[in-house]
Image: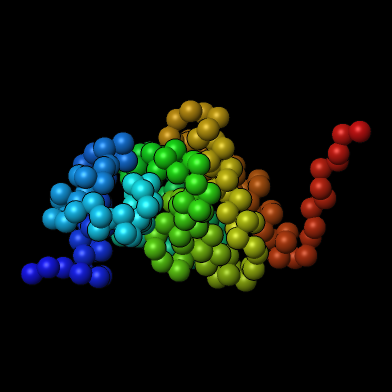
Amino acid sequence: MRRRGQELEQAILKAAQDELLESGYAGLTMEGVARRAGTNKNALYRRWPNRAALGVAAYAGLAADRTVIPDTGSLRGDVLALLRAANSHWSSPLGEILRGLLAGAGDDPELLAALHTRATGSATGSATDGGAGMWQVVLRRAGIQVTARVATVAMGLLRNEFVTRGEPNVPDEVLVEIVDEVYLPLVTGLARGVRHPAPAQSP
């Protein structure tokens, strides 16, 4: 029976996920996905303009299956749990896929935005790629409302550690420092109406 619509799309996404898990983003091809899904490349290109877009969509499903919002009983515990999950994810096989996707989507702002804000394919976003949704959930639980940019400050600092260290894993003491010395003072200060002064400009 010929598959159409949502059924075909799900078959293609499942095939792309299997390809990513087996070969990473570097090994993902439209031909390989079409063959595994039992369809032709035209069916893929009608839905995704290139392999990067397909890879992002496939990764979204993989990340969603592993996304859990922590509830440790404290804001600090929840934030640390999110940051530790992101750190662990980055050095995992899925993290390797994500790094390949980030490199592959580097020239496409829309794809990068998709990775950063909705890679789980859900309304809550993903802690592992910096999506604001999960961070805002744990902040709202503590009575704190901030913008998406502020909510993901900790992830920005974690990514900076990856870049400067050149390794896909950050020591836990650095995560604790990010949370205790930067993130919690920032979000709790904003919740109290404390405005942090902008850094002085050089003359």
Q: How many numbered discs, if any?
A: 0
Q: Quadrant of residue 38?
A: bottom left
Give residue 161's position: percent from left, percent from top.
54, 35
| Image position of 105 (left or right of 201) | left
Indicate whether 190 appears above or below 180.
below
Looking at the image, which is closer to me, 102 or 195?
A: 102
Which residue occupies the extreme left position in the image? 1
Quadrant for the N terminus in the image: bottom left
The quadrant of the image that shows the C terminus is top right
Report whether residue 201 is seen. Answer: yes
Question: Can residue 74 be seen in this snapshot?
Answer: no
Image point 31% across, 59% down: which residue?
Answer: 46
50 over 77 or under it: above or below: above
In this view, which residue lies farthest toward the front? 42
Residue 170: percent from left, percent from top: 48, 36
Q: Nearer the viewer, residue 61 or 73?
A: 61
Q: Residue at x 50, y 53 (%)?
A: 110
Pinpoint residue 30: horizontal percent, then vertical percent. 26, 46
Left or right of residue 186: residue 43: left
Q: Residue at x 25, y 70 (%)?
A: 6
Looking at the image, residue 120 sits to the left or right of residue 62; the answer is right
**Given the current orientation, which residue lies at the most extreme right position?**
203
Residue 117: where, in percent of width, then height? Answer: 50, 57
Q: Up-down: is 180 above or below 173?
A: below
Q: How is the image coloured?
A: rainbow
Q: Quadrant of residue 176?
A: top right
Viewer-closest of 160 and 138: 160
